[in-house]
Image (cartoon, grey):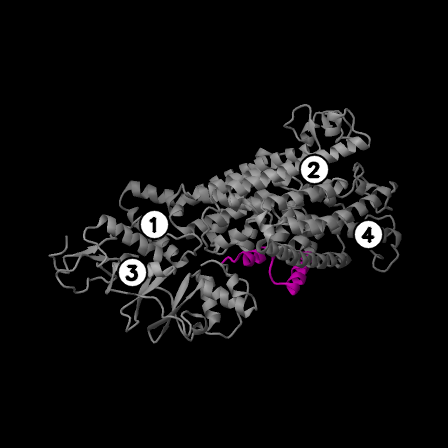
């Protein structure tokens, strides 16, 4: 068509209207935060300017402003509803391993006995609930009945876990694990297609119930954050400004993460702080308030769905009768040291096991691994009542302060009610039940310490919050009872004199369990402020913030002294995700020229010239390289920088031009300037692609210290920056180059960074 036309008349500005796909990102790539925020500002300015033109435009402006709050409401409702469904289903299926309700098989043990006329002490032995031996044999006593109950417990556990791993493997591989390491990476700007999709949400919801019900040493709290983020991502597609802007979508995901923690623990404030402290990369002030709104809606939705279960607003409500004493900070700090040591030990052991799983044949048989770990867990758990019960029930019992009506073995003290006032019991000598409970708890502690190492990271949904809290709660209760008996038998010692007289209620073992739970969770995750607030909201114990903070800070310091990474950061590094940690400082004295590519003896940097390359030349570059983008220069000789163009935008633009624009052939010249270059009259139509060119790419000089470069990448969320010398292009530094450089300086394998 353009054969007889001159160069000016054959000029085509093909991208006057944006093409579908241009400006989007490929899988396993990092978003351009600067470009996304700039786009949102342009969109907002356009809506604001149009709002003055008509009433319809004004209404559109108002709806755009309130769409964020509407989206938070929908996320809270959906996340709370799914959490309620998971909570109710998991309680029922957990009890199904031990028996069934005759009044209705859909009732769990607690609900089955609501209408029973049994006494308070026999409330768990109502006639409506039958164990499997009672149902099959007609009685529940004797060795054969015990063996049958044991067998059914193991069979149900294996059935639930195998169904979970098969569903994950067959339908949604991304539904396994906790999800928090990947969410941290996604919120930092990384693209993982399908990780927050509808199939992942459906399968994770179903398999989370199955995994928790199987009795494996895992929790549902971390996976609930993943479920809530899936809800947020799916609901984002209802609103254009979130569907088309990756940075805005990540603001929503930060709020969804807060809603996830809120429904996991009934802790709206702690959920917001967790999102801010642990997972979010970009957290503006408006996101803070929207996150709190979403978290509140989610928590109240969950409570309205399941008001009588553990999903009430205070998950482990405690009411201790005596305040703590200043001298008790010493055992609280000891619990903090234990939590830090446990956290460091767990992280190292779990990462070593997961690395072995990835590098050996073990990783090829996820179903077999789940089968073996579940069988081992069920066989070891059933004989011990503290490992047989669900982990949430165990923690609740360990946090409990013994009262007159308590029938637990933990409360079987030698009775002496002479000084009893109301429900306030004095310190007493431990009875046979307490000693039996102590050795059972010691065995439960050993089992949970080791079995959790092998459970976390399997191909089923698995959270770490509740197992870590259980380890700490057991250790804390053991120490609390020991301190209580020490105070009872040796109240005249100097450490007890003045505040713990004989017969007084001095030591509260349940408080030690609570502090130990916080210490171990802090040692594994390295949370501090958000952890203390979550524990406060979990238990309702405002006056115990100081002991909780002392234990949490001690556990973090001890764990950091052994290894700097928390469990989620360690799994990010294990999986090779390109996550640039904002909390760590870069103190090495290297320069941009030491990190940029090309290095010495490398081929020259691949560039595109602004007005002298044909479609065929550009397509050859695209086919011969795998780079995510290319610098555009004035000419190869001058190397004067013009801008930067993304590979994906080039491919889409050229393909669409060939299909829809007349005269575009392999010999057509591509130009990125405002005006077309002078060409012979017989030249084919030219292709103008200036609209996909980033005219303001971030640049640094070759002498810029890497300390500044790393800070720029962290704070601006860059994908890459170009390196110049006296205005001439020298090279490029990508986020992956920065991460490899940091790994190399830390004596780690730089090739462990797997993704672009």
Q: Would you say residue 207 is visible in this rendering?
A: yes
Which quarter of the figure has residue 224? top right
For marks 1 and 2 on the same chain, the one whose residue lies earlier in the sequence: 1
For label 2, the residue is: 154
Q: Where are the magenta residues, as a range? A: 549-577
Query: Do labels 3 and 2 touch, CB within 8 Å?
Result: no
Q: Nearer the viewer, mark 2 or mark 4?
A: 2
Query: Do labels 4 and 3 touch, CB within 8 Å?
Result: no
Q: Which label number is shown at residue 607?
A: none
Image check: 22 left or right of 182?
left
| Residue 131 x %, y % | 73, 29
For label 4, the residue is: 482
* Residue 655, placed above or below residue 208: below
Could you tell me which secondary element the residue under label 1 belongs to? loop
Q: Is residue 567 magenta?
A: yes
Mark 3–mark 1 distance (CA, rounded to whole Å): 19 Å
């Amino acid at each position: 068509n353009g054969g007889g036309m001159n160069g000016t008349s054959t000029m085509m500005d093909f991208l006057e209207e944006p093409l579908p796909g241009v400006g989007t990102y490929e899988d396993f790539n990092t978003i351009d935060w600067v470009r996304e925020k700039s786009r949102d500002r342009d969109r907002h300015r356009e809506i604001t300017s149009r709002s003055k033109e008509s009433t319809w435009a004004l209404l559109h402006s108002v709806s755009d402003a309130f769409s964020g709050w509407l989206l938070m409401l929908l996320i809270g409702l959906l996340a709370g509803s799914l959490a309620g469904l998971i909570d109710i289903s998991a309680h029922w299926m957990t009890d199904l391993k031990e028996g069934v309700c005759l009044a209705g098989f859909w009732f769990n043990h607690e609900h089955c006995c609501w209408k029973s006329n049994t006494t308070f002490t026999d409330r768990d032995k109502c006639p409506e609930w039958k164990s499997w031996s009672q149902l099959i044999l007609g009685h529940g006593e004797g060795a054969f009945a015990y063996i049958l109950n044991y067998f059914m417990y193991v069979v149900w556990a294996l059935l639930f876990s195998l169904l979970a791993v098969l569903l994950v493997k067959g339908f949604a591989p991304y539904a396994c694990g906790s999800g928090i390491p990947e969410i941290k990476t996604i919120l930092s700007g990384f693209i993982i297609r399908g990780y927050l999709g509808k199939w992942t949400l459906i399968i994770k919801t179903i398999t989370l119930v199955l995994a928790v019900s199987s009795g494996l040493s895992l929790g549902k709290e971390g996976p609930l954050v993943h479920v809530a983020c899936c809800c947020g991502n799916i609901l984002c597609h209802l609103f254009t400004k979130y569907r088309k802007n990756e940075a805005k979508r990540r603001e929503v995901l930060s709020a969804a993460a807060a809603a996830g923690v809120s429904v996991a623990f009934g802790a709206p404030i702690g959920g917001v702080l967790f999102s801010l402290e642990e997972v979010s990369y970009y957290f503006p002030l408006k996101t803070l308030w929207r996150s709190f709104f979403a978290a509140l809606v989610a928590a109240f939705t969950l409570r309205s769905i399941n008001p009588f279960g553990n999903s009430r607003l205070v998950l482990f409500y405690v009411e201790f009768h005596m305040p703590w004493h200043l001298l008790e900070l010493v055992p609280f700090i000891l619990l903090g040291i234990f939590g830090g040591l446990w956290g460091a030990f767990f992280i190292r052991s779990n990462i070593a096991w997961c690395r072995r799983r990835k590098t050996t044949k073990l990783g090829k048989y996820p179903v077999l691994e789940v089968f073996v770990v579940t069988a081992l867990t069920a066989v070891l758990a059933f004989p011990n009542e503290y490992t047989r019960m669900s982990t949430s029930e165990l923690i609740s019992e360990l946090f409990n302060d013994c009262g007159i009506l308590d029938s637990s073995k933990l409360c079987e003290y030698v009775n002496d009610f002479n000084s009893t006032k109301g429900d306030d019991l004095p310190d007493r000598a431990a009875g046979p039940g307490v000693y039996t409970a102590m050795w059972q708890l010691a065995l439960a502690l050993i089992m949970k310490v080791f079995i959790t190492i092998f459970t976390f990271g399997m191909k089923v949904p698995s959270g770490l919050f509740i197992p870590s809290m259980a380890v700490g709660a057991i250790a804390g209760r053991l120490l609390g009872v020991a301190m209580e008996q020490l105070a009872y038998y040796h109240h005249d010692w100097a450490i007890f004199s003045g505040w713990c007289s004989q017969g007084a209620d001095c030591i509260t073992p349940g408080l030690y369990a609570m502090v130990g739970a916080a210490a171990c969770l802090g040692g594994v995750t390295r949370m501090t402020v958000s952890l203390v607030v979550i524990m406060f909201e979990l238990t309702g114990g405002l006056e115990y913030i100081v002991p909780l903070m002392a234990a949490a800070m001690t556990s973090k310091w001890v764990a950091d002294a052994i290894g700097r990474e928390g469990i989620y950061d360690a799994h990010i590094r294990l999986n090779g995700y390109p996550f640039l940690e904002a909390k760590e400082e870069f103190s090495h004295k290297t320069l941009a020229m030491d990190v940029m590519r090309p290095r010495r003896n490398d081929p020259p940097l691949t560039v595109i010239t602004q007005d002298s390359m044909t479609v065929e030349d550009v397509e050859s570059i695209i086919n011969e390289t795998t780079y995510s983008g290319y610098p555009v220069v004035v000419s190869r000789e001058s190397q004067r920088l013009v801008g930067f163009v993304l590979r994906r935008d080039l491919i889409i633009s050229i393909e669409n031009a060939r299909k829809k624009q007349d005269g575009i052939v392999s010999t057509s010249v591509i130009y990125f300037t405002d005006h077309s270059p002078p060409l012979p009259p017989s030249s084919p139509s030219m292709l103008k692609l200036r609209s996909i060119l980033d005219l303001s790419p971030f640049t640094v000089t070759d002498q810029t210290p890497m300390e500044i470069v790393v800070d720029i990448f962290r704070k601006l969320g860059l994908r890459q920056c170009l390196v110049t010398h006296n205005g001439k292009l020298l090279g490029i530094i990508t986020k992956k180059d920065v991460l490899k450089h940091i790994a190399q300086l830390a004596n780690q394998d730089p090739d462990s960074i797997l993704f672009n």
